[in-house]
Amino acid sequence: MPRDYYEVLGVSRTASSSEIKSAYRKLARQYHPDVSKESKDVAEEKFKEISEAYEVLSDSSKRRLYDQYGHAGVNQQFSGGGFSWEDFTHADDIRDIFGDFFGGGDIFGSIFGNRGSSRSRSDSRNGESLRYDIDLTMSDVLKGKQIEISTPRVVDCPECGGTGAKGGKTETCKQCGGTGHMQRVTRTPFGQMSSISECLVCSGTGKVAIEKCSKCQSRGRIEKSAKVSINIPPGVDEGSKIRVAGQGNAGYNGGRPGDLYVVVHIKADGKFERDRINLWTSVVSTYSKLVLGGEVSVTTIDGETVMLKIPAGTQVGSVLKIPKKGLPEINSPKIRGDLFVRVRIDIPVKVSEAERELLRKLDYECSSAKESKEKGAFRRRFGI
């Protein structure tokens, strides 16, 4: 399990962007393989770990996902399901840190080399998908709902057109000659070994900004709130996901934008319980209606009042059904479930003297009838 990113950089969970960048600069100077006092393997692993933490915490979108869902929330943002150097988007930051150390030379050959991806950042890459959670009532589930939400997402910088260069003006990268790659030759006891790695000066594009775009700090992308209209169909269930294509973060180098996934949560309803497309509720009746039969009014999820027939001899706790007064099937809204009604009875705490007398007479009649029935059964059994 990867370590907590805040712990890796030694910052608090409320650290500002400048504090995060400062912490990374300090650790990068300490653990870069070409300057670290650690062994090469240890330094490379440590440098990758702090770079992964910086990649997530310096990006407001990734940081928000990490704060909410932990590592599982950001792993999907990386091209291989987990961080690799291919996902690192802060080459300029590292070049600024080590420019005075390496004089603008190839400062990443030792950590990318054969371990880097052969894929160039000049290749198009799809943008990250986003998640938005909404709360609905049972009435919303019945009728469906059209809502408008405002969600932050990353878009191409309008000032530079996503190039990171002021006015979109770029020039050929002098470091790689416009190829987007660098060749590194290493002498070993077995001879010379050559490896090709992405040029970290131009991030593999072969172009660099003549002048950095001040609006996006040369990242080519900015965060912007966007209003999105969402159509919630009738019959959605807890955890349902509604995909809105193209409303996620902008793609890279012409890649398509990610999608927006709206996750549905259903608020608890004090009157109705849900069982897929069926609903359950309770109704309070009287002793006399249960014995003699009668009707009782029931309010449905539609807001209608239905007179429910109670058959004579209905027992407390019995369940009666009102057909087609449940919820719609999500893919077939004309199909509706049923409303099941549990029958309860209220026992009064206080009664009048007249009611008390009637209850005594009723109890006497019931007891007499029961006693007579028991005697008749006894006589029949023994032939008396």
Image (cartoon, rainbow, N blue to C red):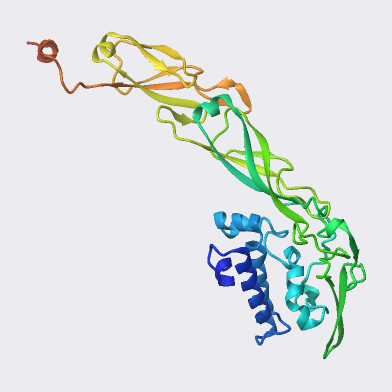
Foreground of the two, 155 or 74: 155
Image quarter hosting the C terminus = top left
In the drawing, does residue 199 fall left or right of residue 215? Answer: right
Position of residue 8 measured from the top left corner of the image (x, y, whole percent): 58, 71
Residue 365 figure quarter: top left
Which residue does the image show at 58% across and 21% down from the upper left? 335
Q: Going by the picture, which residue comes out furthest to the left? A: 384
In the drawing, does residue 35 fall left or right of residue 138? Answer: right
Position of residue 346 measured from the top left corner of the image (x, y, whole percent): 25, 21
- Mark yes or no: residue 129 visible: no
Foreground of the two, 365 or 359: 359
103 w.r.t. 57: above or below: below
Residue 330 figure quarter: top right
Position of residue 104 measured from the top left corner of the image (x, y, whole percent): 82, 78
In the drawing, does residue 207 fall left or right of residue 151? Answer: right
Image quarter hosting the N terminus = bottom right
Position of residue 375 measured from the top left corner of the image (x, y, whole percent): 10, 13
Foreground of the two, 102 or 79: 102
- Mark yes or no: residue 349 visible: yes
